[in-house]
Image (tube, grey):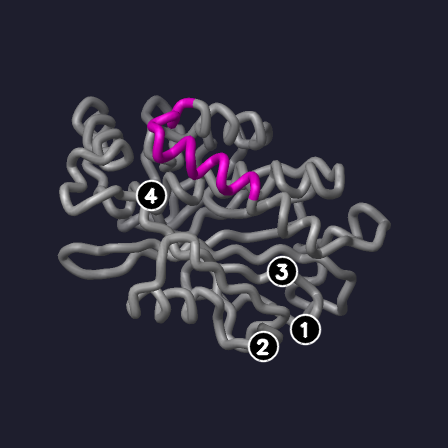
Amino acid sequence: MERTTSTNEIAARLAELGAQEGTTVVADMQTAGRGRLGRAWFSPPGAGLYVSIVLKPWTGANKGSDPIFAYVANSATHQKMGSDPLFAVTSLLTVASGVALAEGVRASTGLPTELKWPNDLMVLRRKLAGILAEAAHGHAPSYVVLGFGINLRLVAYPRELADRVTSLEAETGKTIDRALVFAEILAALAERYADLQAGRFDAILTAWRALAPSLPTAPVEWESPSGLVRGHAEDIDAQGALLIRIGGRLERVIAGEVRWL
């Protein structure tokens, strides 16, 4: 479609109406695109690729026997993570999707990118793409909407964004084939989603770490319940949470605003 409010919103509405897994919503422009923590996503006409996909990462009513949920439960038990299983599933989907976006961009344009926890695709310190995975709420959620936006064209960004974002055209100096980028990203997403469903979690986490070389030892700060805390990023854990070292201990961060210094 040429214009919509939010592709995630439309995909969720379709999912509620019984849309099949893999249903995909694509727009040239969003009037109410959103990112993580409720932020607006700048989505001017023709400047980017805005996509949302309906996924059903569990295979049936008994989620406990599903590879993803079993992995989440097992890792939480053995590492005392205590994560909400549904949150951990969306986190793993975000990790896998970040890898897929990086792979799709490189396959279609040759541009190497870097991942920044939890959901950004970067070129140097500028944001190229973002991911937003949203699970259905309720006692027995039946789907996750995986949304992503990637900047394709050179446009005039708002002043507050101009020095923090970039686009494929700006980085490559070439005209971008939108259809090719879309096709390569979808192909990479299909492969990484298959990894999740088959239980190949180590392969996903290893790939993510290789695409995030700046993460280890990076100085960060975030708002904890007790106030502002500073430390150094060390790794991601088995569920995709960020591990931050503060003195002699590791803090596990699963949500909130983490600022990279």
Q: CA distance from mark 1 to mark 2?
A: 8 Å
Q: Amino acid at mark 1?
A: Pro
Q: Amino acid at mark 3?
A: Leu
| Relative vertical location of residue 205 with respect to residue 19 in this rendering, above or below | above
On the image, the x and y values in percent for residue 220 come to: 49, 40
Q: Amino acid at mark 4?
A: Ile
Give the side of residue 60 with respect to residue 159, left or right.
left
Q: Residue at x 44, y 65 (%)?
A: 8
Q: Amino acid at mark 2?
A: Arg
Give the quadrant of the C terminus: top right
Q: Are marks 4 and 1 in contact (CB under 8 Å)?
A: no
Mark nearer the N terminus (4 vs 1): 1
Within 10 Å of disc 2 (Cα), the crowding (few <14, some 14-19, many 20+) is some
Within 10 Å of disc 4 (Cα), the crowding (few <14, some 14-19, many 20+) is some
On the image, the x and y values in percent for residue 16 come to: 29, 67
User: What residue did someone put label 1 on?
Assistant: 45
Mark nearer the N terminus (4 vs 3): 3
Q: Which mark is residue 254?
A: 4
User: What residue did someone put label 3 on?
Assistant: 49
Give the side of residue 100 with respect to residue 90, left or right.
right
Q: Nearer the viewer, mark 1 or mark 2?
A: 2
Q: CA distance from mark 4 to mark 3?
A: 27 Å
Give the side of residue 96 with respect to residue 112, left or right.
left
